[in-house]
Each structure stands twice: as structure tokens, then as C-alpha cells.
Amino acid sequence: MEILRLLDELEEMADSGERWYCRVPPFIGRTVLDAADLFELIHKMRSSLPQEMTEATQLARDRDRIIEEAQAQRAKIIEAAREQAQLMTSNDELVKQAESKAQAIIDEAAVEADSIRSEAEAWARGVIERLENYTNRIQATVQKTKKVLLAQASRDPEEPLPPDEAEE
């Protein structure tokens, strides 16, 4: 997932000690970030993602379960209608009535199953869309923060070389 890759990249930037700058006195062009705070923020972002992903997975399972229950209910109704129709075969009029009622029950079960399935899918789509919007907002925030940090780093060309590069 893209958001996890971006979090890894942000964490690597912090861990490798890349230089980030801004023009804030009294550090004269340097920003000092508390590594513990930065890593804690990254950890909180990571912690929030699996919960949302777990919810999406659970919603998909719930949708499948609801569809299976609707199909099972439909099968029971159909079976009940068939049994009822078989009991009424002794008389032609009763047979006609039973077939008509069985078909009505089958049609009603099909409509009800389709309705339940449609509602479950609409509900799951809504949850997935909210999850997608949430992850897109997080991704946009990470991208924006990354751009700000990179812009700050490119603004101060007078930064002295690190000690190991200055000796060369």
C-alpha cells in the first residue's frame, strides 16, 4: 500500500538524519526535531491504518455472511414452498393453488434476497469509500509534509558539510 511505503520513507529520512532547514531563530536556519516525537507520530499513523484496514476486511466478511444468510433463507423458503406444493398434489385445484403460492414465495424470496444483497453491497461500498477517503487524506498529509520538508532542505545552501565530508 502506498501510504505504508510513504511512512517507511519518512521514517528512513528521520533515521538517516537528513538535514531539514527552516528560518527559525534562535537556531539560525536549522530545525531540530525530537526524534522520539517524530517516531511516535509515525507509529501512531501506522497504528491507525491497520484498524481501518481491519474494519474494511470485517465489513467485507459481514457482507458475505449477510449474502449467505439471505441465500440460505431463500433456499429454506423455496424448500418449504416445494414441500407444501407436494402435499397439495392430491387435487388439481389444490395443485394449482400450491404452484401459484410456491411461485409467489419463490419470487418473494428472490426479491428479498436481492434486496438484502443490494443493501449489504451498498453499505460495504459506503464504508470502503469512507476508508478510501480517509487513507487518501492521510496520504495527502504525508505528501504535503514531505514536500515542506524537502523545500526546507533545499532553501539553505550555506549548510556546512557533515564532519566526515569536510575532512576530504
Image (cartoon, rainbow, N blue to C red):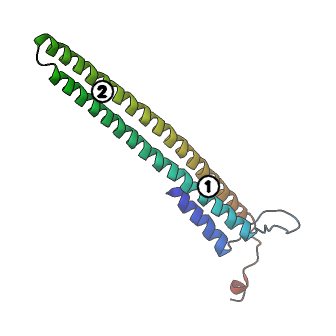
Q: Amino acid at mark 2?
A: Ala
| Mark linked to residue 143 | 1
Toward the top, the furthest residue is 93
Q: Residues within 10 Å of mark 1 (few under 14, many from 20)?
A: some
Relative to the observer, which residue lies in front, 71 or 79?
A: 79
- SS category of the residue bearing label 1: helix
Question: In terms of image quadrants, where is residue 36?
Answer: bottom right
Toward the bottom, the furthest residue is 167
Q: Amino acid at mark 1?
A: Gln
Q: Position of residue 35 (x, y in %)?
A: 72, 70
Toward the right, the furthest residue is 26
**Residue drawn where x is 11% and y is 12% of the image:** 92
Q: Position of residue 25 (x, y in %)?
A: 87, 64
**Residue drawn where x is 48% and y is 36% of the image:** 123
Relative to the observer, which residue lies in front, 115 or 92?
A: 92
Q: Is residue 91 visible?
A: yes
**Residue drawn where x is 55% and y is 41% of the image:** 130
Left or right of 2 in this view: 112:
left
Q: Position of residue 158 (x, y in %)?
A: 77, 72
Left or right of 122 in this view: 160:
right
Indicate whether 116 appears above or below 58.
above
| Mark linked to residue 110 | 2
Indicate whether 119 appears above or below 51.
above
